[in-house]
Image: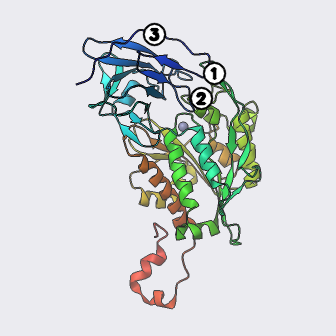
Amino acid sequence: MRETHFLSAIAFAACSSFFLTQNVDAQIQLDASFDHASLKASQSFVSSVSGDIMLRGRTNYYGNDWRWLYFKTSNIVNQNPQFWISDDFAGGSSRLTNHKMIYSYDQENWHYFDNNGLDYEGGYKFSNNTNFTQNDVYVAYSFPYSYGKASSHVASLVGNPYVKPTKSANSNLVIGQSPGGVDDLGRVVTPKNLFGYQITDTNSTKPKKKIALTSGLHANEVLGNHTLEGMINMLVSDDPRMKKLRQHADFYVYPMLNPDGRYAGNNRTTVENVDEDPNRLWHPALYQDHKDIKTTADAMIADTDADIDYFIDFHSTIPTGTQTDFGYIPYYKDNHNDPFWLSLKDREPQIAALNSTGTNWYTTNFAESFLDAEFDMTFETMFSLNRSQDYYTDLGESFALAFFDTIVPLPEPTSFMLLSVGLVPLLTSRRKRD
Ligand SMILES: [Zn+2]
């Protein structure tokens, strides 16, 4: 049984400072003033049987719709409110049908709410069956991946023997700064770091495949960042397969392409250009006035000498016709039959391929036209499948292992192996090796 609160009314207001704090009642406070948080305003909703907290999502880029939600509630211990938010969800309210919101006491360990769902009154409601056990509770649409988290992860790689700055980067693996700006709530976002680094065995003189990896372009698409982080942690690990892979591969990593939008809690875009999809601008004629994209794009051309073998951009998406994670892959280049993709499919049978067609100056079009990428893919991890956070980092490990399967040459057959009929499949299969 939920406790009853009596909530006082407050006005909707766009906050003009970075301190968006709303008094919902004498005890409960909502705060969306921190890195990656997003909430427009809140109002009270009074019921005779329960205390409900009505939320307003930010609508930047998507007309009247929201697509990202993340805030902190304070003074909520021993209470059990029901949260409401409008079902004006970008992409359609039906995309919330199977969605579950999450909460955390520490911003690290997240739990799904017990009760989630669309309501006939035009809202989406979520609540728990039991009271919160701590004073401060974080609530989010999905597992947050803040600018600060990206920054800390990059900092943790400085000095790693397998990691070095790209040609464009300084010793802190920073290639430049984003432009910053003023967000839709009137808050000043200061310029943020853009990162670039390489992972390889610098002592290896063997021929190397060149692989460029990016993420964080769409501000709300956090799952892609978790997958890339899982992949990076595998690539720099002491796993013997990764040791071999680093001798034959050179990874160029740009992990947070839109730090301003991520920091500001935007639904999709950068802060400087809140009305433009940043994944339609990856051509020199289009990105001259978009400092964040231009900085990374110019760095990628210089860093890779405009010649790579593989390009992967990690995104996330809402449920559509394809109810699983998938890669947009250009079939006309036969990339869906590339050994890397086939190995990844062997390791992650649930993923799907969709034909990528046309040129809209996505990152992948840029990679094909300006980095001469042989293989390019936008990989979309799916929201609303209510998986554990570990699923996404484990998926990233499979990307690293699929490159091992694909790039590291098979051992030269020994006379013993040639005499052993049972080992013939090992010599002929390029797929999923341990
Ligand atoms: Zn995206």
Hey, which residue is sitting farthest left in the picture? 1
Q: In the image shown, does 320 or 297 lie closer to the viewer?
A: 297
Residue drawn at x 51%, y 66% is: 405
Q: Label 1: how many residues lie within 10 Å, few (<14), some (14-19) or many (20+)? A: some
Q: Nearer the viewer, residue 25 or 256?
A: 25
Q: Is residue 88 left or right of residue 40?
A: left
Q: Residues within 10 Å of mark 2 (few under 14, many from 20)?
A: many
Does label 3 or label 1 sit earlier along the sequence? 3
Which quarter of the rendered image does ligand 1 occupy? Answer: top right
Report which residue position mark 3 lands on: 10
Q: For mark 2, what is the residue?
A: 264
- Residue ID at (55%, 56%): 233
Q: Which residue lies under the disc numbered 1? A: 187
* Left or right of 140 on screen, residue 215: right
Q: Amino acid at mark 3?
A: Ile
Q: Quadrant of residue 422?
A: bottom left
